[in-house]
Image: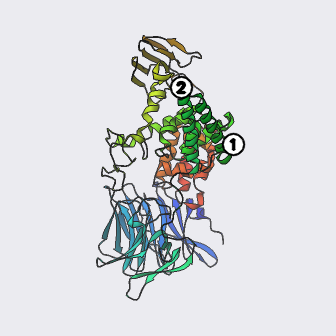
């Protein structure tokens, strides 16, 4: 039988089913959503409203059910809540506030349990009776992933969902059981992926133990009533620690060999050791050719498809032709986009990624990377009050506490290597000859910066560059030390200006203040490249519950759809029938894109 959710109200959508009962959400006149229970009676669908929900409830989700009860989560103007619903008559038996989205709610014949995070960033597992009674709260610390919660008799189970390739140890990756009336705990599984409760109340967990490996486990009371895991299906994967590979991938090591041989050749030539210079130049060329043969496709894709390998290949000139460089630059820019304009390189790639983007015509993407404030980014520590460069992007967590992991130095310059790019590309002060005998002045302004300056103490004296954008004008000041020459590239000018020692000033029309073509968002990539539109899309995804983790989650979901039409963005992010908030998100995206899309 086909059931049309619109038969029960405006903008109807299926929220799921409990047994043979279909749960449907519809829009109401208060701006919220009503919920209906639908069963087949005498061969036809018959609905009854769920009574007792707030009229302003939005984003309702069906998250758990037993043969006679269901749990709905939703958001009001003030808070998140869950509601326990009697499936027989649709009455809400109990409503309960939650400190955050209670997506982990689970239900047994006697209790309701869920995980929530408080304003200080501390996570708790909360258990409360289905009827009246008080909450039991169990602190589990700061959690970086999704907490999976289950109920087995008089025990609650919890664990953080993780893949087998997690790099940092965390005791919460195990599935732990805790007794509801005592302090007794026991470890049920060594690794947790997902949990699900069957209609008969049996808890099933996808995870593993070191002894039995990964698979699907049934968790049920043992002889003493405590939960015991029994494997019912194997995935064939081991849970034990496994070596995945060497620390330095061959592609990175090969790039370094080509680069090192070239530097040796250059140094030998300066020293007049021409035979050695020729030998190392030949080695560099041979390794460069091997690098392309082994790791690079004709379309510019590089093995591992990680931002670092593209940055290495582009900045160190390892690619054979310009078409490869162009396509590699485009791929690097796309990788930055789908990372939500957050840093996704390490010590090797971070000093090079903005130069690689700039050299291939993607300076706007480099600026988006520079100005990002979400973690990981260069400016996240600044938002936390940093005055030094940290060893890890989140040495201080958003709540102001120190990251409990290793590598938490607060003075460790490597990740701050972007300062070199700031000097050379943003301010525009770079050497055009050894020792700054010749200066290259070529600033690259962006709309989000109104001024920049840089100074450098050269062997000839102090070199200085400063620019400012104001009232449609771009003013540039350059100071060249005695004995040096400056090559100045002014915005809008095809030919550079050569100047000698002294102070020089120019005022030209602001290249970013001139009227341009109206914004046209043809593809999903165009949406990401337009900061205001992208921010609106991310805001809509968060507000409708599609992307609770924000920008990075939305960007990653669009990885395969950058060339799709902008008008297909909502469908690309998530099919409408898979999430209750998808329809609201689709309406929001249409409102955002209609004025500017084609």
Q: Is residue 201 visible?
A: no
Label 1: how many Cα within 10 Å (few below 14, some 14–19, many 20+): few
Q: Is residue 300 left or right of residue 166?
A: right
In this rendering, the answer to whether 587 lies above or below 455 is below
Quadrant of res 130? bottom left
Q: Residue at x 51, y 77 (%)?
A: 212
In this rendering, the answer to whether 34 lies above or below 389 is below
Query: Could you say whether the residue bearing mark 1 is in a helix, strand or loop?
Result: loop
Query: Could you say whether the residue bearing mark 2 is in a helix, strand or loop?
Result: helix
Foreground disc of the pair 1, 2: 2
Quadrant of res 101? bottom left
In this rendering, the answer to whether 450 lies above or below 569 is above
Quadrant of res 225? bottom left
Q: Nearer the viewer, residue 252 or 14?
A: 252
Q: Nearer the viewer, residue 129 or 459?
A: 459
- Extreme residue in the bottom direction: 223
Residue 303, x across and y down, in percent: 62, 49
Q: How is the image coloured?
A: rainbow
Specify which label sits upstream in the sequence, 1 or 2.
2
Determine which residue is flagged by label 1: 299
Q: Which mark is residue 585?
A: none
- The total of numbered circles placed on residues is 2
Label 2: how many Cα within 10 Å (few below 14, some 14–19, many 20+): few
Q: Is residue 398 visible?
A: yes
Q: CA distance from mark 1 to mark 2?
A: 36 Å
In this rendering, the answer to whether 12 lies above or below 379 is below
Residue 293, x across and y down, in percent: 68, 45
Determine which residue is flagged by label 2: 270
Residue 410, x across and y down, in percent: 32, 45
Placement of the N terminus among the 4 image quadrants: bottom right
Placement of the C terminus among the 4 image quadrants: top right
């Amino acid at each position: 039988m086909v059931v049309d959710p619109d038969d029960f109200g405006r903008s109807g959508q299926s929220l799921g089913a409990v047994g043979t009962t279909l749960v449907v959400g519809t829009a109401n006149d208060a701006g919220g959503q009503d919920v209906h229970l639908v069963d087949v009676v005498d061969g036809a669908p018959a609905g009854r409203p769920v009574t007792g929900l707030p009229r302003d409830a939005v984003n309702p989700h069906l998250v758990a059910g037993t043969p006679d009860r269901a749990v709905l989560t939703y958001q009001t103007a003030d808070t998140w809540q869950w509601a326990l619903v009697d499936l027989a008559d649709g009455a809400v038996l109990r409503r309960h506030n939650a400190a955050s989205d209670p997506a982990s709610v689970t239900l047994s014949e006697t209790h309701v349990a869920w995980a929530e995070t408080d304003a200080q960033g501390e996570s708790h597992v909360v258990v409360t009776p289905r009827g009246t009674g008080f909450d039991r709260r169990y602190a589990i610390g700061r959690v970086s992933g999704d907490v999976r919660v289950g109920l087995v008799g008089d025990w609650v189970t919890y664990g953080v969902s993780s893949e087998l390739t997690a790099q940092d140890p965390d005791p919460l990756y195990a599935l732990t059981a805790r007794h509801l009336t005592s302090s007794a705990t026991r470890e049920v599984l060594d690794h947790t992926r997902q949990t699900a409760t069957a209609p008969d109340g049996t808890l099933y967990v996808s995870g593993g133990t070191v002894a039995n490996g990964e698979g699907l486990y049934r968790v049920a009371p043992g002889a003493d009533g405590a939960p015991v895991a029994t494997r019912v299906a194997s995935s064939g994967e081991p849970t034990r620690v496994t070596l995945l590979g060497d620390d330095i991938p061959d592609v990175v090591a090969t790039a370094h060999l080509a680069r090192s041989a070239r530097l040796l050749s250059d140094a030998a030539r300066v020293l007049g050791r021409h035979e050695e210079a020729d030998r190392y130049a030949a080695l560099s060329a041979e390794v460069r050719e091997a690098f392309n043969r082994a790791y690079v496709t004709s379309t510019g894709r590089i093995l591992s498809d990680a931002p670092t390998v593209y940055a290495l290949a582009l900045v160190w000139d390892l690619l054979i032709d310009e078409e490869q460089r162009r396509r590699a630059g485009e791929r690097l820019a796309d990788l930055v986009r789908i990372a939500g304009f957050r840093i996704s390189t390490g010590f090797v790639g971070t000093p090079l990624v903005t130069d690689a983007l700039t050299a291939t015509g993607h300076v706007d993407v480099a600026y988006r990377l520079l100005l990002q404030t979400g973690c990981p980014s260069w400016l996240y520590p600044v938002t936390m009050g940093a005055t030094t460069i940290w060893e890890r992007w989140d040495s201080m967590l958003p709540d102001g506490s120190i990251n409990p992991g290793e590598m938490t130095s607060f003075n460790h310059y490597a990740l701050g290597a972007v300062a070199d790019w700031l000097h050379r590309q943003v301010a525009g002060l770079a050497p055009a000859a050894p020792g700054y005998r010749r200066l290259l002045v070529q600033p690259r302004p962006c709309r989000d910066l109104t001024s920049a300056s840089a100074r450098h103490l050269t062997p000839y004296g102090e070199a200085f560059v400063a620019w400012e954008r104001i009232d449609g004008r771009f003013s540039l000041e350059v100071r060249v030390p005695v004995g040096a020459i400056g090559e100045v590239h002014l915005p809008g000018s095809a030919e550079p200006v050569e100047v000698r020692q002294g102070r020089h000033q120019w005022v030209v029309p602001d290249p970013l203040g001139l009227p341009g073509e109206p914004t046209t968002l043809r593809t999903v990539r165009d949406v990401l490249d337009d900061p205001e539109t992208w921010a609106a899309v991310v805001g809509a995804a968060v507000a409708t519950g599609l992307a609770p983790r924000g920008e990075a989650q939305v960007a990653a979901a669009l990885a395969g759809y950058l060339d799709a039409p902008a008008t297909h963005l909502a469908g690309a992010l998530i099919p409408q029938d898979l999430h209750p908030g998808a329809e609201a998100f689709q309406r929001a995206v249409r409102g955002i894109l209609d004025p500017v899309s084609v």
